[in-house]
Amino acid sequence: MHRIPLIVAGLCVSISCVAADSKPVSDDAALGHAKALLARVPLVDGHNDLPYLIRDHPKHRGDLEGYDLRQHTDGETDLARLKEGYLSAQFWSVYVDGGLKEGWARTQLEQIELTKRMIERYPETFMLATRSSDILEAKKAGKIASFLGMEGGHVIENSMGALRAYYDLGARYMTLTHNVTLDWADAALDKPKHHGLTPFGKEVVREMNRLGMLVDLSHVSAEVMHQALDATEAPVIFSHTGARALAPTDRNVPDDVLKRMQANGGVVMVYYVPEFLSSKSLAWRVGLGKRIPKGSSKDEIAKIKAEYEKEAGLQPEVTISDVADHIDHIARVAGKDHVGIGADFCGATTPTGLKDVSTYPALFAELIKRGWTDADLEKLAGGNLIRTFAKAEQVAARLQKTRKPSLAMVDKT
């Protein structure tokens, strides 16, 4: 789930990985190659907001029968298009709005319950998953390993017990913040209060390590990124993000963090959010955001947007090539062992060529044309995430032998 970003200094450049002596690959050949590859190897997506779209749907609010994935939906995700996209594993975001005045934990429980019912409703396609090994098991069975990913540490309400309870309910990653700074961690798109993580925040990271819950650093400030990397004993993930060097928003990962991923062993999963992939699209979106008063309704926002488009023109186009540029940049700075896919389909605008979950092969075809090898594409598709997840499980097994459940509490004095 994404929102309008803040601007920070940066540089937008274009990268190509095609070797000077490589022969051009036709579009049809590249797409055929991509489909054959993805039929063979597991493809993992780190972030899809479908459960929230169902909860918030204007016609089928929370109604899994009404929002029938066996039919073509008005969103980006349904069963037919998932099959066409060759997806093998999905982290379904059980997102809770950090701006809620109350009920974070209740809403989180509702989202987990809704998502589990969604998975159970389509046993021919989905398999509830909690272990890294479930990905290959689901692939062999022709199903999609379906994980739960919590988006925002506000839902633990400063409670280690709640964190453990969510793990027991199946949550396998937690984004430390969403867009709201917490009592223990600074968000990328909110005012900083702590210069990173508080002592309790660092203990949250350690407790997630002990549980085997992946630490997700999407949405957090750069200071939190660095301090979490200092505190963690397990590899971390960015479930949906981009490269700040190419789009200057605090929502993306700076190069000095990318350079630490090799030592950490984690994976940075690239999203399809136009305003976070292009400096021009970012500037347009920020301009729109300044026109929208806080608390505006959807109808009010639509009216403001229409007026803004008359003045500023349509949002600058972002394409499949821009997404590939971010993947290339992260692969070059962090290494090809540390990049993955986290599309962040959330019912919003997507890059040209990546309209829905059927289009993963098109992105891989673009990378094939840039000279990516099958071995590196296999890592990108799912190998890197599977390795990261398995290592986190190994760390948890070790820590549980010597470390008791944390009783830490937030110090508000």
Image (tube, grey):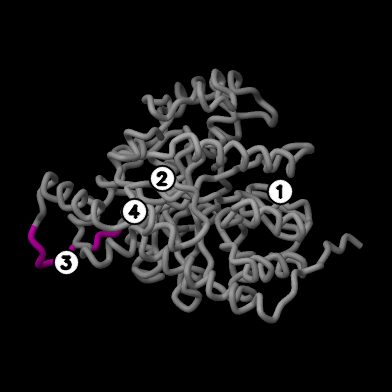
Q: Nearer the viewer, mark 3 or mark 1?
A: 1
- Camera-near label (3 vs 2) is 2
Mark 2 or 4: in front is: 4
| Residue underneath mark 2 | 272
Residue type for callout 2: Tyr
Counting residues from the N terminus, which is met first, the one under dot 1 or under dot 4? 4
Residue annotated with mark 3:
19
Q: Secondary structure at mark 1?
A: helix
Q: How many marks?
A: 4
Q: Is residue 177 visible?
A: no
- In the image, which residues are magenta? 15-23
Do the CB atoms of the residues marked 2 and 4 lie less than 8 Å apart? no
Residue 74, percent from left and from top: 42, 25
Q: In the rendering, at what x and y percent does residue 346 appear?
A: 49, 37
Question: Quadrant of the rendered structure where residue 136 is?
Answer: bottom left
Amino acid tagged 1:
Val
Give the mark toward the camera: 3 or 4: 4
How much space separates mark 1 and mark 2, taking CA atoms?
A: 25 Å
